[in-house]
Image (tube, rainbow, N blue to C red):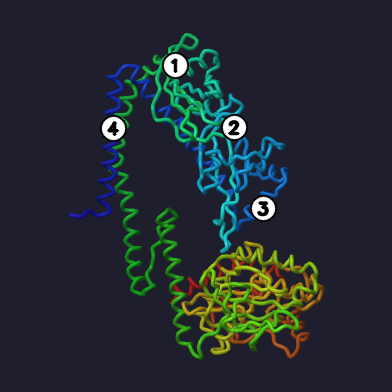
Amino acid sequence: MKLGLTSRILLGTAGSVVLALALALGIASRAVKQNATRDVDRSLEETAARVQDALDSRQQVMLKGARSWAEVANGVRSSTLASVDSLEAGNGYDQAVGAAQAIGADWAQVVNAAGVRQGKSDEPTALRDSLGSSALVGAALEGKTSTGFGVAHDTLLFQAIAAPIFGASASGSSQGRIIGAVMAVRFLSDTLAAEIGRGTKSQVVFFALDQNDKPHLTGATFADRGSLEDFVGSRMMVKDTTRGEMKGEVVQAGVAQGMMRDETTVNGTHYIGYGRKLMSARGNAVGGFVGFRSRDEAEMGLDATRNAIFLAAVGGLLLAFVTSGLVARQVVRPVQALASAARRASEGDYAAEIPDTGSDEIGTLASAFRSLLADLRDKQALVDFLGASASGGQRTYPIASGSAPTLQLVTGEDDSLRPGQTFAGRYEVKNVLGVGGMGVVYKAVDRELNETVAIKTLKPEMLQQDPTALERFKSEIRLARRISHRNVVRTHDLGEVSGRYYITMEYVEGKSLKELIQARGRLPLAVVLPIAKQLCRALEVAHEEGVIHRDIKPQNMVVEGDGVLKVMDFGIARLATRAAGQGHTQQGMIIGTPEYMAPEQLMGEEIDVRADLYAVGIVLYECLTGKMPFEADNVFTLITRVMEDVPVAPAQLAPMPQALSDLVMRTMAKDRKDRPASARELHDLLDQLSSALAAVA
C-alpha cells in the first residue's frame, strides 16, 4: 500500500530519530569499552578529517573567487587581458593585485596564454618567467581549474589554485578562447592551525619539506616547537619524498589518504600523533599536517557522554512524534491545494484560489504560484484579444512609414543592400523592414550563428555632427547590451562597414501597440493592464542598468502573437538626442516624440527614470481612451498645452476603475516628484489594481 505524505513524514522522522539513537548508543557503548588509545585514534581521525575539510573549504572559496575574477560579466576584465602579451609589467602587477584581493589570497599571479608571467601581487618587479611547464599553470591553460600544495622559500607551506581566463567568443559570451590563467596562494599558518585546534580540541601542526627533505613548521598550536620538526620529519613522514621541479609553485594532486601514526612527548605530556602528507601535482610529498591528542584528556567524560546521548535521544524520539504530526499537517494541506490548482491550470483554468499559508517556504511557493496564475490569466486575455484582432498579417519593427529598396554605403558608389546580399561578411539580407529618421531596418540571417536578426543602419549625420558622439554612443550600446529580459528587444552589437555604422538586434515578429490602438481605438482593460505591467518590467531592468529609454511610445513596442510585449531601441534614443544637439542637450531643444515627452524633457532639463514613467502614463492614457491627452496642430502649441493644461481624466472618456484613472493622471504629473518613483513601484501599483479587479470578477 502506498503511504501518503503525512505518514511518510511521521515514519521518516521517527526512523531518523531511531537510527540516530541506535548509532549514538552504539558509539557510546564502544567508547566506554575501548581504551584511551582507541578513543584518541578516533578523535585524531576526526581531527584529520576536519583539517582536510578546512583545506577543501579554503580551496573552494579560492576557486570561486578566481572564477568570479577571471570570468567577469560581459568580458570586461577578459577583454583587458586579451592583449596580455603586450601588457607592461606594471599593468600585469595591477591585475595580479586585483586578483589577490578578489580571491582573498596572500598573493596571486597572472600569466598569458603562452604561460608567461605578467605580474605577481607580492613582487612588483617579478620577472616574466615562463610557467607553462608548471602542472598548475598548464592545467589552467588547458581550460581546467586546478589546486594543490607547494613550498615557498623552502620553509612556507601554501595552498594554491589556478583558473583559466577566457576571452570573449564570437557570440559575446565569456566562454571563448583561453587567453591566460590566474594563480592564487594562501599560506598554512598558525592562524589556521589554531582555528582547527579550537574546533577539535587537538593540537595541530603544519610542516613543509625543503629541498633536502628537512621539515620546517609553518603553523602550529604548540608553544614549544623545538622537538617537533625532527619528529614529523624522521618518524611521521615515509621516506619516499623525492621532489619534482618546484619553482615555488607546486599544486596539489591530492591529500594522501594513508594515515601516519606515531607517539611523542612534549613538555612531559604523552601525545599520539596522526598525520597525512600533502602532495604536489607530480605525486611527491611537499609537506603535511599532524594532529595530536593527550590520552589522559581523552579518557575524561566518556561515561557521562554515553548517558547524555541516551537520554537526549529518547527525549528526541518522543518529541519527534509530536512535532512531525504538526509539521505534516502544515505542509500537506497547502501542497494539496497547489496540486489541485496546478491540475486546473494544465487544463486551461487559471481561476483557482490559492490559500494564504503565511511567510514560510510553502507560503513563498503559494505566493509565486498565485502570481503565476495571474500572469497566465493576463497573458491569455492578451492572446485572445490578439487572435480576435488578427487581420492584415504582421509587421515587424514598426517605425516610420516608407521603404528603402537600397542603401548607398559609400557616396558615389553603387554598394547597396539588396535581398540576398551578404552584409558585413556574415549577414544575408532578406528584405527592408522599414525606414525611420535614424536609418533603415533590415531583416537578415546571421550565417555564422544561423539565426534571424534585425539590422538597423545609421545615417552618417547621426554621428558626424559631434566628434565625440561615436564614443558616447558606443557607451550607450554597451549599456543596452546588458539588458537581457523577455520584454526587451535584445541589442546584439554595433558594427561599421565602409564608414556606415549599424546595430544588430533581436528579430521580433508581431504588431506594434500603435497598430492595435489604430485598429481598435481604446483597448479593453484586460489587455491594457498586462501590456502596462510588461512595459514596467522592461523599464525596471533597463533603469537598473542605468539606461533611460527617452522615447517610450506605442510605435516602439511590439506585441508578439503569444502575448509578450517587446520594447525596442534601448540605447539608441540618446544618439538622436546628441546628434540633434551636436553632442549636448540644449535648453529648450525638442528631442524625440513631443506627444510622449515629459515637461522637463521638453524644456531640455536633465532627466531621470521618471521621464520614461511619464511616457508610460501617456501610453496608458492612449490605450485606455483611444486618444492622446494633448493634441495640437503644431509642436509649439503642443508644448504649451503639455506645460500648462491639465488633461481630461481618462475615466471621463471611457469606463474604467477610478483608481486606474487616478494612477494614470499621477504618472502624467507635470512635477516629476508627484509621479511614481520607479518602474517597479508603478508595476506593483498596476499589479494591485489587477488583483483587485480579478477578485471582484
Against 592, residue 187 (above or below) is above
Residue 185's spot in the image, x, y percent?
A: 58, 36
Give residue 173's quadrant in the image: bottom right
State which tag comes first along the sequence, 3 or 4.
4
Badge number at residue 23 = 4
Badge 4 density bin: few <14, some 14–19, many ≥20, Cα 10 Å:
few
Question: Is residue 257 or residue 329 the one in the foreground?
Answer: 257
Against 144, residue 614 (above or below) is below
Q: Amino acid at mark 3?
A: Ser
* For the residues bearing labels 3 and 4, Cβ distance under 8 angstroms: no
Q: CA distance from mark 2 to mark 4?
A: 49 Å
Q: Secondary structure at mark 1?
A: helix
Residue 202's spot in the image, x, y percent?
A: 46, 22
Report which residue position mark 2 lands on.
247
Badge number at residue 83 = 3
Residue drawn at 46 percent across, 11 percent down? 265
Q: Secondary structure at mark 2?
A: loop
Report which residue position mark 1 lands on.
235
State which tag comes first along the sequence, 2 or 1.
1
